[in-house]
Image (tube, rainbow, N blue to C red):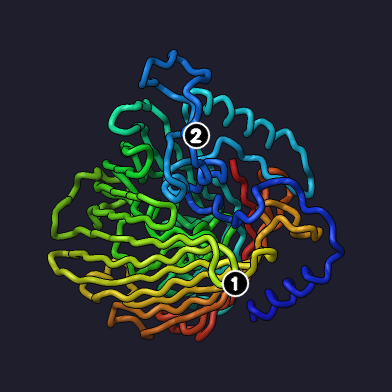
């Protein structure tokens, strides 16, 4: 059982010889906040005062206005986490502390940051093998994938209480090595409702975000409009929100009860008036096909609006920081309407021990949840994060997690109505930008698998973070 293995690892950590932890992030900060899709650095998230007006740039700062600023936009902490990217890709505590490739990647990020361009580039090579697959399907997969998120700061101004504007872009790509990933995939072979391998995008390269972002009121309000991916902003979670270097099953990244398209025309409004509360609303089309015009088929007959209310607290009963989110939504699919609700919680389980808990649970009207095929879902688990004094956990991106998920089908034609499973994963920091991640998943009662009642998938993933 994943939780038993996790408990053993925690016990061995508690018995380790005391030693000073590597100097890295501020004490008390939950490590893996920076590892979500499109995550921001701790420096950006914890910004509490405006950056200095002076600094190098292609244009001199005019009174109250700066074109192509090199400093990040002033923003409230949670909104910075959801919108900004770090200019540093080097992580401490690696087995091999220096390598030319990591240093070259950092040099490029530093150069681009000097003209206001910041980004996060995730790449992986994945090898996966299955037992219990649907008869006649592939059981072994070799896969390359990449996700790129970036922003380009265009201006900032002291007008309107402090405002800034920037472009945001995101793209994905992937290919099966030795097979056509458009026709064969771990999901199809397992016969599951969910996606066991979150980095599986098919044989394609596609743009899924190109939008304008504008902050107002000195970073309390952020508006995004254009071609965008709703999941970049909604339902973020410190402990499980990134298929690179965290739990790999996509149910741990975004609940499949959300009737959303991963690229569509729409808008996002984010408001954080105080440190402990924020509100978001994302409204967008939900039927945009990949690699097609974002204006194709746009209508209110296929539209989703998701609202998110977040409560951010520094300490709960002496356990440490956490976030609670409630996310009601309303959608139309082919003219039929329906509503749903998702809850999301993350909680640190001790101020000194880097152990955390997360859970997501949601339900939706089958009229609209048929879009992704899931009517109700639950996902939760325990996570141990680095850096710690122990040998195999001293890296900043060290990560050990055990998770459980359950899905109920919204499609009456499936062989079964419910499926569930377990995942156990571990991340070892090899170099400042490279990690090795073995992963085990057990999928029980897959709803589209007439061959087997259980599928076991073993995955080894190399992740490069630039």
**Residue at the location (28% across, 55% down)?**
281
Query: Which one is earlier in the sequence, the residue at label 1 or at label 2?
Result: 2
The image shows residue 201, relative to residue 43, as above or below, that is below
Task: Find numbered disc 2 in the image and state the secondary structure of the residue it sits on.
Answer: strand
Residue 147, position as x, y percentages in the image: 49, 46
**Residue at the location (27% across, 42% down)?**
225
Relative to 368, is 55 on the left or the right?
right
* Residue holding disc 1: 382
User: Quarter holding the N terminus?
Assistant: bottom right
**How far, Cα to Cα, is label 1 from label 2?**
31 Å
The image shows residue 124, relative to residue 99, as above or below, that is below
Task: Find numbered disc 1 in the image and state the secondary structure of the residue it sits on.
Answer: strand
Q: Is residue 185 visible in the rendered structure shown here?
A: no
Q: Quadrant of residue 223?
A: top left
The image shows residue 241, relative to residue 134, as above or below, that is above
Relative to 128, is 99 on the left or the right?
right
Q: Is residue 395 visible in the rendered structure shown here?
A: yes
Residue 336 bears which disc, if any?
A: none
Residue 118 bears which disc, if any?
A: 2
Residue 26, position as x, y percentages in the image: 65, 48
Residue 149, position as x, y percentages in the image: 46, 42
Q: Nearer the viewer, residue 307 or 5?
A: 307
């Amino acid at each position: 059982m994943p939780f038993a293995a996790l408990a053993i690892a925690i016990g061995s950590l508690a018995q380790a010889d005391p030693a000073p932890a590597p100097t890295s992030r501020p004490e008390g900060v939950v490590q893996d906040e920076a590892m979500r899709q499109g995550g921001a650095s701790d420096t950006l998230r914890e910004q509490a005062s405006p950056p200095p007006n002076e600094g190098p740039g292609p244009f001199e700062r005019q009174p109250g206005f700066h074109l192509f600023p090199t400093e990040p936009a002033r923003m409230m902490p949670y909104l910075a986490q959801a919108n900004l990217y770090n200019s540093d890709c080097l992580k401490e505590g690696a087995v091999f502390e220096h390598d030319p490739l990591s240093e070259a990647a950092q040099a490029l990020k530093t150069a681009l940051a000097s003209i206001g361009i910041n980004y996060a580039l995730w790449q992986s090579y994945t090898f996966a093998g299955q037992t219990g697959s649907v008869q006649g399907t592939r059981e072994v997969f070799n896969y390359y994938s990449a996700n790129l998120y970036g922003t380009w700061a265009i201006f900032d101004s002291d007008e309107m209480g402090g405002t800034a504007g920037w472009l945001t872009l995101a793209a994905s790509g992937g290919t099966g090595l030795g097979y056509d990933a458009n026709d064969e995939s771990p999901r199809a072979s397992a016969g599951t409702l969910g996606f066991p391998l979150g980095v599986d995008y098919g044989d394609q390269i596609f743009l899924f975000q190109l939008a304008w972002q504008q902050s107002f009121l000195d970073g309390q309000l952020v508006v995004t409009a254009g071609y965008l991916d709703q999941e970049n902003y909604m339902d973020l979670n410190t402990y499980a929100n990134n298929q690179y270097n965290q739990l790999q099953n996509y149910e741990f990244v975004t609940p499949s009860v959300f009737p959303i398209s991963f690229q569509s025309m729409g808008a996002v409004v984010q408001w954080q008036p105080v440190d402990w509360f924020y509100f978001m609303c994302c409204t967008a089309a939900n039927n945009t096909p990949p690699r097609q015009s974002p204006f194709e088929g746009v209508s209110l007959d296929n539209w989703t609006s998701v609202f998110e209310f977040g409560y951010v607290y520094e300490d709960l009963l002496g356990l440490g920081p956490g976030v609670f989110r409630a996310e009601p939504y309303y959608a139309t699919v082919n003219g039929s309407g329906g509503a749903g609700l998702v809850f999301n919680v993350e909680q640190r389980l001790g101020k000194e021990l880097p152990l955390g808990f997360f859970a997501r649970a949601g339900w939706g009207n089958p009229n609209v949840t048929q879009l992704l095929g899931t009517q109700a879902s639950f996902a939760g688990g325990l996570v141990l994060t680095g850096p710690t004094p122990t040998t195999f956990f001293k890296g900043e991106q060290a990560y050990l997690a055990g998770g459980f998920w359950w899905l109920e089908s919204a499609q009456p034609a499936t062989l079964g109505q419910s499926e569930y499973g377990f995942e156990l994963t571990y991340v070892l920091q090899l170099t400042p930008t490279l990690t090795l991640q073995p992963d085990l998943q057990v999928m029980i009662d897959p709803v589209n698998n007439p061959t087997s009642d259980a599928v076991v998938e073993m995955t080894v993933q190399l992740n490069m973070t630039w």
